[in-house]
Amino acid sequence: MADIIQLLPEYLANQIAAGEVVQRPASAVKELLENAVDAGATQVQLIIKDAGKQLVQVVDNGQGMSPTDARMSLERHATSKIRTTDDLFRIRTLGFRGEALASIAAVAQVELRTKQRDQDTGTLLLVEGSQITSQQPVACPDGTSISVKNLFFNVPARRNFLKSNAVEMRHILDEFQHVALANPHISFSLFQNELEVFNLPAGKLSQRIVALLGNGYKEQLAQVEEVTPFLTVKGYIGKPESAKKSRGDQFFFVNNRFIRSAYLNHAVLTAYEGLLPKDTHPFYVLFLDLDPKSIDINVHPTKTEIKFEDEKTVYAIVRAAAKQSLGLHNMAPSLDFDGNVNFAPIQPLRLSGQEKNPFDDSFQPDALASAARAAAKSPGRPAAQDAYERQLPPRPTEQAKRDLEEFYKSLSQLSVPDVEHEATAVGVPVPTIVPLAPDEDLPADDGPLPGGLPLQAGFTAMPAAAGPPAPEPAAVPVVLPSASAAAASPELPLRESSTGPGNKVLQLHQHYLLVPVKSGMMLIDQVAARERILYEQYTQSLEREVSASQTLLFPRTITFTPQDFAILREVEESLRSLGFRFTDFGKHTIAVEGIPADVPARDEKELLEGLIEQFRTSAGPMRLDRREQMARALARRVAASASGARLSEREMTAIVDKLFACSVPNYTPDGRRTLVMLEMGQLQELFRK
């Protein structure tokens, strides 16, 4: 049998090697920017056209190269960074393998101009598919300019796999951001299609963070600095109130090289334990400096993964440094005893014609309690007992007002079965409550309900079965609703007229709904049910490309990072179809004027950040349509915002009815169950001996 193993042609070997290094235009951007930093540049310019598919150009004022070095830089495994094996364990430069330029030149048309400071002329090289087509002297400024044109021109299959311009530009921004953050002492600029996107002068790290990520971080930075013989940690973390739904603004640099590490990310998160709202992520830019011998960066083609010799010690130091910074900046949760709650001082009670002693037993310091007692007094009360006059204080703050309204609302919505259940549980006799006839008057000697709750208008109490008298509890002052308000909210009817199964829906632990059906009982997860209902509503809205929208009284401005703003532009059409209304309001900023009709107000920023984060991480083995992704993401976010809510009977009935009107009521869009059926046989089996 003839020999069949042969050496691959050089151009084919280069193309195969390029597949590991150059996966998309952003890969070329990363390699070229890192080469500029290694060359000692103080000014770096990045020029992009057509999201890097047409042109990626990096211009720097670094050391430049001689004609021989310029030609050698395009050869595989040619580098100026290392010479021996020992050098491999003392790496401080970003590049060292000598593969980047050779891999880029194998799949693109490259133009290289370079000049050293002590030379009168520079060198121009033209390369196409690893083949040098021209080399000649040229007049050019000091430094190096590399233009990568028509990426993957000779590998059509790879070019077809590139994403949309918005997606590719987002990846380019990521790489630009990593290098710019790691080197605040270098001036960077970015041009996209001849428009300037960033112009970052050299300065401090804090200035670079604000320039890259937005002015919102200006007052939210907490400095981190921890120096040990083994490891030095420096940088900034964000205050807890700056936490976002998206996890994009998290950066680790080891010896000035950007890395990704879930292990170190967990170390920072544990430092924030108890300080962050649910499902939010902190911001941080942390630099770790340690001996290169104690790490291995040669474990991944893109060099974004790293292995530590003693990762547990690194974890402990990073966690301690972050926690110490939070403590130094007084970010532990505390009570504010100095806050101005905007209450005017209570005026003392005054007797007609003379001043009442404020230390008298009948003196009431609480104006709200006094007002409640006055509203609840019986009609037959003698006028002589109303001898005191009271000047009420000015209206409290809006927050206090909302709290009181929620309190009274919860009392007015307390149903009779709830009162009976709670009273029976503690052994309090429950009076029988029957409605009065329309023309029947309320008796003058009506008494309070157990717990001091006065009877609502329209109900009277009959004596309950004889039993031991219960101790009289302290009176609870309650403002009674007016007669018109009581008439406007009658008791909800039972579900005989409902189209859904069963007659009575009960809520369990503010999370599940119990629905009796003919064959037994149905248990519904109210959050999962909402998600299925909203998903089908949003899907229909996206198909019609129109949806109901609620206009905000005051538009809200939201500023995004460049990466998140690029995602927003990518999904803008779908957001508008769902009911979002917004306009541009400056750099990376929008003014939200309207939101979908069923989305709670005041959650616009959190909702949009959550949608962007979910859209960023939703890519999986099964590629979904963009509108399908958006409908799923919004339904999940809006449904989760109502988790743990106490529902009225009408709301519970509506959820059950709408769920069974869905095309697939049994499951959420991602396959989780919305309901469980318990047959009568199963229930009976539970109680058999």
Image: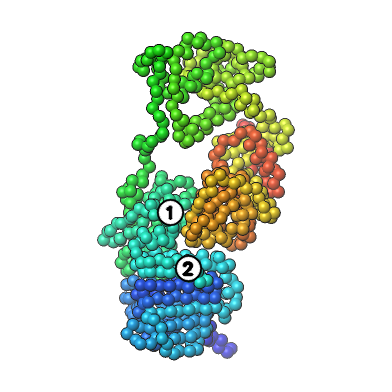
Which quarter of the picture shows residue 209? bottom left
Q: Secondary structure at mark 2?
A: strand
The type of colouring in the image is: rainbow
Residue 26 rendering spot, x and y as whole percentages:
49, 70
Q: Residue at x 36, y 69 (%)?
A: 186
Residue 249 rendering spot, x and y as whole percentages:
44, 58
Mark nearer the N terminus (2 vs 1): 2
Amino acid beneath label 1: Gly
Which residue corresponds to mark 2? 196
Q: Which is nearer the eye, 405 or 420?
A: 405
Q: Is residue 444 left or right of residue 304?
A: right
Which quarter of the rendered picture does the N terminus lie within?
bottom right
Amino acid beneath label 2: Glu
Above or below, 40 against 513 in this view is below
Residue 311 rendering spot, x and y as whole percentages:
36, 60
Label 2 Cα crowd, 10 Å radius (few <14 / some 14-19 / many 20+): few
Q: Are marks 2 and 1 in contact (CB under 8 Å)?
A: no
Q: Residue at x 59, y 52 (%)?
A: 581
Q: Does the rendering let one see residue 99?
A: no
Q: Residue furthest left?
A: 229
Q: Does the rendering let one see residue 560?
A: yes
Which residue corresponds to mark 1? 216
Which quarter of the picture shows residue 629? bottom right
Residue 310 rendering spot, x and y as whole percentages:
34, 61
Label 1 Cα crowd, 10 Å radius (few <14 / some 14-19 / many 20+): some
Q: Residue at x 47, y 68 (%)?
A: 196
Q: Residue furthest front?
A: 353
The residue mark sitting in front, 2 or 1, is 2
Res. 471 mark: none
Above or below, 49 against 679 in this view is below
Q: Alpha carbon of mark 2 to alpha carbon of mark 1: how far?
A: 21 Å
Q: Secondary structure at mark 1?
A: helix
